Amino acid sequence: MSISNKPEVWLRGKIPEVPDLLQPAAHALLQSAEEVSRYTEDFPEELLWAKPAGRASVGFHLQHITGVLDRMLTYAEGKGLSDLQFEYLRQEGSASEKIGIEKLVAAFQQKVAEALEIFKNTSETILTEKRTVGRKKLPSSVIGLYFHAAEHSQRHVGQMLVTISVLKIS
């Protein structure tokens, strides 16, 4: 059965080894990964950085969902961002001939796989532990960061689908 014929990830059952309370975040991230692959299949490379109606490019969305997921995982560990992460953040949305769609999709897929491994090794007992976000140290929790990473990915995948749809009919 192809992915397009399968039910959404959340309707396929539990993700093995992922704690029950992290199942929704795991499902959402896996759904995002599948949709990114499906929506970008055969997408023209020359449209990767196009901004229809001044909106974010497909390239931006792919960079951004990878970067946000990476940053949320870092904050969930109770750490601040590294210089490399700040540089990645500054470069989000920057068109580069060196960054093709395959590389961007692969980077997101890899980050989702990393997140799932982290989820598998996370005890439910720490999910409500306080964490802070950013330089302002805004309040959150481990589960809040994991959930935000998942829902944020879903939101941007939806926006990316609209951008792809508009670009393909233009």
Image (cartoon, rainbow, N blue to C red):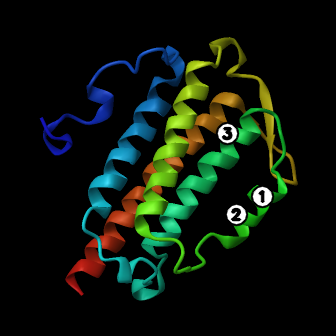
Sequence-wise, the earlier of marks 3 and 1 is 3
Mark linked to residue 84: 1
Mark linked to residue 145: none
* Residue in the image at 50% along x and 51% along y: 108
Q: Above or below — where is 9 with respect to 60?
A: above
Q: Residue furthest right?
A: 136
Answer few, some or many: residues within 10 Å of disc 1's Cα (few below 14, many 20 plus, some between 14 and 19). Answer: few
Left or right position of 142 against 115: right
State the separation of the CA atoms marked 2 and 1.
6 Å
- The part of the image, by quadrant, that contains residue 73 is top right
Q: Which residue is mark 3?
A: 73
Q: Position of residue 23 (x, y in %)?
A: 46, 24
On-image quarter of the C terminus: bottom left
Q: Amino acid at mark 1?
A: Leu
Nearest to the eye among marks 3 and 1: give it. Answer: 1
Does dot 3 land on a helix, a strand or a loop?
helix
Nearest to the eye among marks 3 and 2: give it. Answer: 2
Left or right position of 61 against 76: left
* Residue in the image at 62% along x and 69% along y: 92
- Closest to the observer: 90 or 135? 90
State the separation of the CA atoms marked 3 and 1.
15 Å
Sequence-wise, the earlier of marks 3 and 2 is 3
Q: Amino acid at mark 3?
A: Leu
Q: Which residue is mark 2?
A: 88
* Residue in the image at 70% along x and 64% along y: 89
Contact between labelled residues 1 and 2, with CB atoms less than 8 Å apart = yes
Q: Position of residue 113 (x, y in %)?
A: 50, 36
Q: Above or below — where is 93 with respect to 32?
A: below
Left or right position of 101 against 117: left
Q: Position of residue 12 (x, y in %)?
A: 26, 25
Q: Position of residue 126 (x, y in %)?
A: 72, 18
